[in-house]
Amino acid sequence: MSASRRDFLWRSWNGIGGLALSQLLKEDLSAATLIDPMAVKPQHLPRKAKRCIFLFMAGGASQMDTFDYKPKLKEFAGKRLPKLPGLSGEIEGFLNAPHRVIPSPFEFKQYGQSGKYISTLFPEIGQMADQLAFVHGIKVDNNNHGPATMHVNTGSQLQGGASVGSWISYGLGSENRNLPGYVVIQDPRGSPVNGSAVWSNGYLPASYQGTLFRSTGSPILDLALPKDVTRDQQRREFDYLAQLNHQHSAERGGSAELDARINAYELAFRMQMEAPKLVDLGSEPETVRKLYGLDNPVTEGFGRQCLLARRLVEGGVRHVLLIHGVEIGKFSWDDHGNVKERVPQHAAEVDRPVAALLKDLKGRGLLEETLVVWTSEMGRTPFINDLTGEKPGRDHNQYGLTVWMAGGDVKAGTTAGATDEFGLRALEQPIPMRDVHATVLNLMGLQDDRLTYLHAGRYRRLTDIGGQVVKTIVS
Amino acid sequence: MSRLLFIVFLPALTLAGATFENDVQPILRAKCAGCHDGATRTSGFSIASQDAVLAGGARHGAAVIAGKPAESVLIRILRGEIKPQMPLGKALSAADIATISSWILELKPELTTSKNRPYWAFVKPVKLPVPTVTGATRNEIDSFVLKKLAEKGLSMAPEADRLTLVRRVYFDLIGLPPTPREAKAFVDDPSPAAYEDLVDRLLKDSRYGERWGRHWLDLARYADTNGYEGDPEWPHAWRYRNYVIDAFNNDKPYDQFIKEQIAGDEFFQIVSAVPAPPPEPEQAVALSFLRLAPFNRTPVSEENRDSWLSEMTSTVGSVFLGMTIGCAKCHDHKYDSVPQRDFYRMKAFFSTVTVPSTGRAGGAEPAEFYRPGEKEWADKQREKEKQELTSTQADFDKFLEPLIAKLTEAKKREDAKFEGKLAAKDVEKEVNADNNNAAGFDKKPEILTTADRAEWRTYNEKITRLKKAIERLEPMCMGLRNSDGPPFAPSPPATHILIRGDYDHPGEVVEPGFLSAIEGNSNPAVLKLDRYKMFPTRGRRMTLAEWIANPDNPLTARVMVNRIWQFHFGRGIVETSSDFGRNGSPPTNLELLDWLAVKFTEEKWSVKKMHRLILTSATYRQASLYDDSKGLQVDPENKLLWRFPRQRLSGEAIRDAVLAVSGRLNLESGRLPVYPPLPEGLDEGQKVQGVNTWETSDGPDGRRRSIYVFQRRALQLPFLETFDAPVLNTSCDRRRQSITALQALTMYDNDFVNGEVGYMAERIRKEIGPDVREQARYAFELAFNRTPKPKELEGALKLVAETRPAASGLIALCRTLLNASEFIYID
């Protein structure tokens, strides 16, 4: 490591008090990385957003029960869909089931100046309607959870790609060297489909991988001292260790690599003291805790995730990925059965926390600088899919995903794209997911065709063959 | 016309007879050498020779078109027509550019046409005469290395001392440290051939296969699970892991190793109308190689199959040929002479591959593949599991009886007309019901108690686990086969070029064919079908395998010797060891690479002979502690090997070494995957409805070598991951050696390390007795294979004395030593 880089690292360490959990956790300090991988890089385009919070609803959230209002479905309740123009043959669902329409069991209401119809399951988010811009009728490349989740999170349905947060960290670097550039907080009840592949750096360098935080207890593994080891004892051991390591390095001509390793131990020592403060939400005032719903067991889980996300972006973390829902089972948005009871449950868990996040960011003047993206891995069908037949649910629908965004240069109150009157698929040109990725990058000041990385003989990018920015929702 | 115009602008002086050596090179030397001399070669472009300049760099390819200066990349860059203009931030004078232009104008066209100047990697390597050099050599490798060093005015470091060597060779060949006794035996060995004997002994040690097999598993993107939804287990993948370990231990000739992995089912010759017998079990297992990528099962479509075959094609290309042919899936390769059609010609060799369609991740093929003694073990183990399943099932049925009765009773209360009896599946429904809505009881108070539900789940999990355990032991493998072909199944399907790689845009049909950039391969390959061509789906992959595993293939041997070299020295002669194309790094010593490649084929593709040759060279035996200021200045990255490159151990080697020094490493080889304990808090999130639990191996199984750890795609063992062990979704040719604060936390705080340092202290007390000074000495020998220096010993004793509680003093010392750089950096 060059002297100047080492100086830089130490300066930034000492210069910023308070939170001290560092990107250096993951950052490769070895001599191979002479160019600082997390240095702040200029945007390609002047955009207000500096940070991104990506809210991922695992399982495939039903668009026609949330943000894509389809009153027409009522007329067809219990009937088969009519023959739709432009469709040849049978409509695909993921499972075989009678394709009988179920209208949304939930009321929709117009919210805000924009008059956007939003399901009354989201009264709190509804209050923030004028901050949001919607994209309907997004097409995802695959009709099942594993590949679709990869596609929405990494731009490719195959495992091995780099996630949105990795691309953004790679493109912009990290503003605060004492926090990780990219943090992931998953649902406290478990992991999403594909596990850590969802926030993988893929072919990008390891510095850009998401750092997995736990929302309770110690935020990362191996932070607590070994049993029976006191702080004093650790200091004694580290002093002796430093003696051994310094001598070892000196005998080898002061290798940069070995020196970097010595530093790593000192960083680790300080980190152990500072890191737990980061996830200590006890320091937040009661009003804020209530705002996020920490006082209610239904909203507490995602509320903690959202409040942590705010603390993280406030501290300069570039990208935060929050995952709501786990792989399979009742905590997933994968409502093949019982839409009537399960969608309200998921909605209740996220409505207050998400609205709180938007309000809180706005109140602190952070929403201008923070892009918030709400998405799932696909939409659902307007027709029935319940294996027992008693409690109707909906099937997978790779053509009907809804995404909304807020903050930064998002043109709030707008809607782009549309599904047909049944919410099945886009009427005109569907919006491919790569266009949404291009839009997210654009709103972060990055151009998808300039943000490339040479891997295995090919310049890779998030949008693969390139995406078109969805201009309607960008100011 | 353009030529005429151009001449008009040239100063008359430079018109006649400019040569590279006299006129052009001096200009380039003066202005470009800082970044583009033979050693720096920024962007792969070097001005060292006329050939190098003609060849151009990685970015733009051939730099010169003879006779056409205005179109030549070199001139266009110098003029700023291609950005960035060179030299960076400056520009050559018009006169200099004119001189270079006039040289290009008069160049003979045959010098720059690709037909006469094929890329080095596409030309069969030849053994050049071993150069005569000054300096001590032990074998031919040293002559080639010294020649390159001498060109830079460098020489080799002196030989490393014996303690360093023994530690280096142990870790390198078997991935474990020598015991203090083994190290001493080598140091004290008076034989002049002591070192060679050590190398030979370790090459015969079965732990060698566990170290080198791991390297191959990285290339083969090996895992025990499928990835994607549910990350389902591949219960038979572990047999491939054992196959690889055995292949290295038995020094299976590399050409055979290739053929088995690409076409293990096509060895039998068909000489009559009778279909071929099933493959040898070992060769059936080898075929797992083609199947080890994460398998995307959905949608169930032809497109999905297409991407599966494409992955096979790309991986075979990068692993065996060092060519990133996958790039040509969508367009002609931008840097290498791989036209798009070549990718599909290669893919056509795989068009008849099929896998049993059972199971979420595809089914298994039969393979009675057992290592010595393993069949008895497997049969016994399976029998045991089966008995346990039977008795558990019986207990479970007994447990269910009263619950069924209870449910039936409740049902009758609810529905007076109901007759008969509910069944076990109704109990399951009731247990898993969200809100009591199963079995027709909507929103009713719970019938089963919490304890009932918990017990039901315990039984269910146990039964699931036992069934899985039995399945793993079935004599099956992750292999594949060809479709049957006529008359019962179709002939091989046509392979189309896909326009822009898009499945919905099929183009022209192609026949199986090899890389056309290698001379003689522009026509379709002659398929090795059976004599009567009765089984047209069979023989395609063997045709490909035989072309790859052939001394005439210019890539195969080079790529493999380079990999071997890389794992010994930490860096290959070609640094990008899976990319020998123009965009990869150029070889630092092509003559050496070619000599080794030819030698490898001459020695019948013996990997062990290659190890021995490399390990007994003076190049390998150099010290790493060597401060040559000239070396540091001229070749700071030590690419030419003026000293031995110090290397950090891999995550697996660190974990194994921790267990080795604590004396608790379980050296049992082969068999099923093991599940070392996960850090607290991690395992809970890994449970998905009772499947895919991490079946923690608490006993000695949890302390087996890291290569045996269950490789789960959705969850890498955090300890290994922290030390750069990747989740293998794609082939990995070289591990990173990062340095992070997280590694420090892991080595110091981790439960696993702290458990083992306790045992290490216990072991020391037992073997050494109560003398603290002797204990400290021995701790150093275990951790570093050397005795402490006086100051180190003093510090150690002080640490031990000051530690509270006093009984933990030795543990504190052990923990500190394992955290020291010397424990994980090998000189």
Image: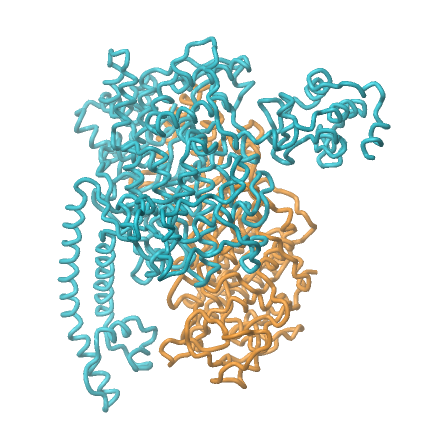
Q: Quadrant of the N terminus of chain B?
A: top right
For this view, does B820 lie left or right of residue A133?
left
Residue shown at 75% from the left, 28% from the top = B90
Q: Position of residue A95 (x, y in %)?
A: 42, 71
Image height check: is A367 above or below A339?
above
Count of marks placed on residues:
0
Q: Is residue A382 above or below residue B475?
A: below
Q: Residue at x 53, y 76 (%)?
A: A120
Please identify the residue farthest to the top as the structure is shown: B134
Along the line of sight, the residue nearer the viewer: B568 or B720: B568
On the question of residue A18 being in view, the answer is no
Find chain B in the image and tell me its colour.
Answer: cyan
Q: Is residue B131 above or below residue B522?
A: above
- The chain drawn orange is chain what? A
Compare residues A332 and A235 and report the one nearer the observer: A332
Question: In the image, B100: left or right of B364?
Answer: right
Q: Position of residue B174 (x, y in %)?
A: 30, 30
- Residue drawn at (57%, 55%) of the image: B507
Along the viewing direction, whichever of B689 and A83 lies nearer the viewer? A83
